[in-house]
Amino acid sequence: MPGAALETGIKSIDVFAPMTQSGATGIFTEWGLGVLVLLPEIIRNIDIDDNRQTILVFLPPMKTVQHWKELDAEITLGSRAVSIVYLPVEDPISTGFVNSINGLSTKIVLSRRLSEQSIWPSIDPLVCWSARHESEPDAAMVACRVRDLLSTYYRLQFSTEPEARHALNEDEALLVQRARKALRYLSQPFYVAEPYTKHPGVFVSGQEARRGFEGILSGEFDDLHKDAFTMTGALPRAAG
C-alpha cells in the first residue's frame, strides 16, 4: 500500500500523478519543456519535513560545456524535504523507457506536444502514473475518464487512417470541445513564474482539480469558451 498522499497544489500532478509522502517520483523530460520551473514550484508547495520526497529527473545530457554553463544557474538542487537527482539518459520520454523504470511511486512525463500549445506545465496525463490510484478508486476514475476523453480526441483529430477521417457528428463535436477545454485546464499559473508571466500563482487542491475536470466531463461548462480554462485555478475564469 502506498504511503500518505502528498498534495502539490498542481492540478495535473494531483489528478494524474499524485505523489506519496516519503515516495520516489520520476520526472521524464527533455530540455525546453519547463522542468526547471516545475521543480521549484513543487518544492515551494511541499517543502515540509513530513513531506519527504526523492525526485529523479530523467533528461538528455548537456550537449556541450557551454550548454551546461547556460543552464547551471537554474538547476534546482532540492531542499530540506526534497532530494533531486538528475540522471542523463538518451530518450527519457519514450513510452518504452518510461515503462522500463520500476520502483517509483509516481511517474510524471512532460510533453512537447503540450508545450507547443503553450500548455504549462506540459505534463502529459496520458502517460503519467501513480501508485496512489490503486488505493483511491474514485480519484483514479476521474483521471481515467479524462484520459479516455483526450485519447478519443486525438484519434478523431489526428488519425492518419483514411477510414477514420470524416465529418464530426454532433456527439463527436461536443467531445472535441470538451477535450480542448480539458487540455487548457491542465495549465496553471505558478508562484515561481509570477515575475515573468504577471499571472498570480494559484494552489489548487486535488479535490478542487478533480471537481473542475468533472465539470468539463459532465457538460457543466459547455457554454464557456475554451479560453476560459487557460492558466486558471480551480474553476474557469468566467465561472469563478
Image (cartoon, grey):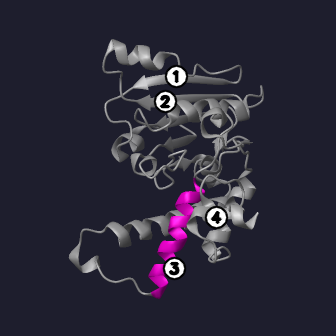
The residue labelled by disc 2 is: 57
Rendering coords of residue 1 (x, y %) = 66, 45
The vertical placement of 157 against 184, above or below, is below
Upstream in sequence: badge 4 or badge 2: 2
Q: CA distance from mark 3 to mark 2?
A: 37 Å
The residue labelled by disc 4 is: 213
Question: Do the residues under discs 3 and 1 have CB atoms within 8 angstroms?
Answer: no
Q: Could you tell me what secondary structure mostly forms the magenta stretch?
A: helix
| Mark number, residue 100 | none
The vertical placement of 226 against 72, above or below, is below
Upstream in sequence: badge 4 or badge 1: 1
The residue labelled by disc 1 is: 85
Q: CA distance from mark 2 to mark 1?
A: 6 Å
Q: Amino acid at mark 3?
A: Leu
Within-10-Å neighbours for mark 2: few <14, some 14–19, many 20+? many
Q: Residue at x 49, y 30 (%)?
A: 57
| Mark number, residue 174 | 3
Of 91 and 132, nearer the camera is: 91
Find numbered disc 3 in the image and state the secondary structure of the residue it sits on. Answer: helix
